[in-house]
Image (cartoon, rainbow, N blue to C red):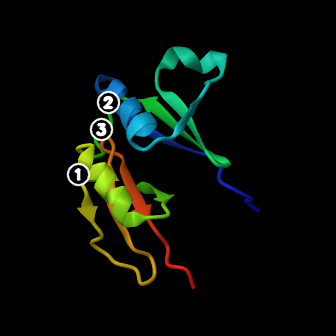
Amino acid sequence: MFTRVDHVNVTVPRSVEAAAKHFYGLVLGLEEVPKPEASRGRGGAWYQLGQVQLHLSMEDSVENHTSRRHFCLIVEDLANTKKHLIENGVEIFPDDIPTPGWPRFYVRDPGGNRIEIAQPQKN
């Protein structure tokens, strides 16, 4: 039925748009790609990560800071990623529901969207 994820959309208040772009583009190092002409006036940005895009949109009426909804980014070195994020002022939230073989932690972007950072153990 479904074949793949095309994109994930996260929303942040317009007041933190610049901070969110800095977070996704510079801190996380995602590649920004041009938005379609019709979408450019809405603000935000689109990022490419492999075959999946992350769409950053503006939505002022959302309160995400307590939500558990999230997307997951896989990394090759969890410890180095954690160190990098801490050095860039990103708060780390430990895994409150550990899953064997799936070491992870969480962060939140400037708009409060929860992001799981994981390094699956190889079998």
Relative to 24, residue 82 above or below: below
Give residue 110's mark.
3
Instruction: Rate crowding at label 3 as few (under 14), some (14 to 19) or many (20 or more) other CA atoms within 10 Å.
Output: many
Look at the numbered disc 1 and give the secondary structure of its residue: loop
Look at the numbered disc 3 and give the secondary structure of its residue: loop
Tell me if 26 is positioned left or right of 61 in this view.
right
Q: Quadrant of the N terminus?
A: bottom right
Q: Place residue 78 in its image quadrant.
A: bottom left
Give residue 104's mark.
none
Give residue 19's mark.
2
Give residue 91's mark.
1
The residue under label 3 is which amino acid type? Pro
Nearer the observer, 43 or 91: 91
Relative to 104, residue 30 above or below: above
Tell me the distance, in whole angstroms, between the alpha carbons under discs 1 and 2.
14 Å
* Horizontal and vertical percent position of residue 29: 47, 41
Tell me the distance, in whole angstroms, between the alpha carbons under discs 2 and 3.
6 Å
